Amino acid sequence: MPKTPRTPETPEISYEAAREELIGIVQKLETGGVTLEESLMLWERGEALAAICQQWLDGARERLAAASTQSETVENGTNDAT
């Protein structure tokens, strides 16, 4: 899979890495056995990771919408980009 070009809005961590780390955090929190302070730190990191995942998904949604619009424009013969 080609790498996505980095923009100021692109998170430093990939979607897949953020998701995997988030899954691990959820498992730790569900299992228990950590202190309140550790639980709070895990929760905060999980919130940050969830936001990163959402940012990636929003970006993907925008790219799909743009590609779909471009495809429809070409199919309808109204491509002004030539």
Image: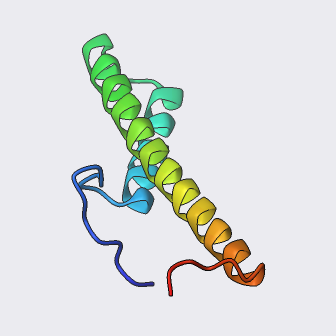
Q: How is the image coloured?
A: rainbow
Q: How many circles with numbers are drawn on the protein?
A: 0
In the picture as drawn, the residue positioned furthest to the right comes out as: 76
Q: Which quadrant of the structure image shows residue 28?
A: top left
Residue at the (61%, 73%) spot, across then down: 70
Q: In the rendered image of this protein, does residue 43 appear above or below residue 61?
A: above
In the picture as drawn, the residue positioned furthest to the top comes out as: 36
Residue at the (59%, 71%) spot, across then down: 67
**Which one is in front, 36 or 11?**
11
Q: Residue 1: x and y, percent?
A: 45, 84
Q: Residue 19: x and y, percent?
A: 46, 51
Q: In the rendered image of this protein, does residue 24 appear above or below residue 14?
A: above
Residue at the (41%, 36%) spot, across then down: 51
Q: Residue 13: x and y, percent?
A: 29, 56
**Which one is in front, 46 or 25?**
46
**Which one is in front, 67 or 22?**
67
Q: In this view, does 70 lie to the left or right of 3?
A: right
Q: Which quadrant of the structure image shows residue 25?
A: top left
Q: In this view, does 18 lie to the left or right of 58?
A: left
Q: Which quadrant of the structure image shows residue 4?
A: bottom left
Q: Is residue 52 left or right of residue 9?
A: right
Residue at the (50%, 87%) spot, across then down: 82
